[in-house]
Image (tube, rainbow, N blue to C red):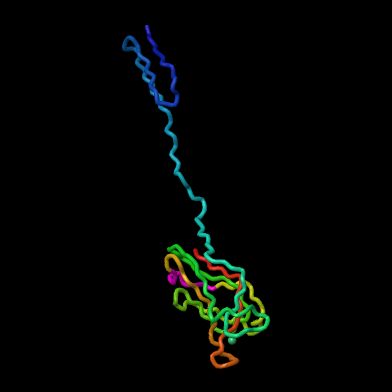
Amino acid sequence: MVFQNWLPNLFPKKASTVTMTASNTEIVPTTTIVDKPTPITPPFTPTQPITVISTTVYSSTETFHIGDQNIEGFEPLISLCHEILFQVALPVNEFYLELETYGTEAQNPIIVNKSEIAILSPQGIRSPNEWTGTRTVQLPANSLVEGMNILKICAGDVEIEPEFFGDKDDFQIRNIKINIK
Ligand SMILES: [Ca+2]
């Protein structure tokens, strides 16, 4: 006589063992039922390369007149340099200035933290007295320091037909942005 003892599968989510036994040695089947392990999926699978988005650390739509003369049609003169303060958290891989210019005719220095690091060049002999589109000036990221930084856009020497000895360029700037990546 075969005696079968079926254990009800009350807890199907757990591994369970159902053993069929017999009173003699004729049949001793053993069946083990084990739930399939849940496939392990990685928590995050990037499907696209991560893009580093630039951050604007300074932005102004105001118009500033840099130079050494009052000029009709220009905004009132500020001074020989326009100074911008901005905050940065290092590390920074890219650092650039965007702006529109009106009337740049000289090699106008861009100074960051007291070092001259770039030139805002003449905008062209044919169109010195009109607004340009957005100009982008790449700047060396290693000129930045943690925290507060100072960028100055200054008037350079007029080398072609200066109006007087020591004449500095007079020009306007607007829509200024300082960006980092
Ligand atoms: Ca001048």
Q: Specify whether residue 142 is painted magenta.
A: yes
Q: Residue furthest left?
A: 25
Q: Is residue 147 left or right of residue 22?
A: right
Q: Position of residue 46 (x, y in %)?
A: 49, 50
Write down the region rendered in magenta: 137-144
Q: Position of residue 61 (x, y in %)?
A: 61, 69
Q: Quadrant of ligand 1?
A: bottom right
Q: Position of residue 130 (x, y in %)?
A: 67, 79
Q: Residue furthest top?
A: 1
Q: Position of residue 71 (x, y in %)?
A: 64, 84
Please name whichever residue, 36 or 174, is drawn nearer the observer in this view of the structure. 174
Please name whichever residue, 23 or 17, is drawn nearer the observer in this view of the structure. 17
Please name whichever residue, 80 or 18, is drawn nearer the observer in this view of the structure. 80
Q: Is residue 167 left or right of residue 26?
A: right
Q: Specify whether residue 154 is painted magenta.
A: no
Q: Residue at x 36, y 19 (%)?
A: 30
Please name whichever residue, 59 or 119, is drawn nearer the observer in this view of the structure. 59
Identify the image quadrant of the N terminus: top left
Does residue 51 lie above or below 31 as drawn? below
Image quadrant of residue 42?
top left
Does residue 35 lie above or below 23 as drawn? below
State the count of labels: 0
Image quadrant of residue 114?
bottom left
Q: Residue at x 44, y 72 (%)?
A: 143
Image quadrant of residue 103?
bottom right
Does residue 142 lie above or below 109 as drawn? above
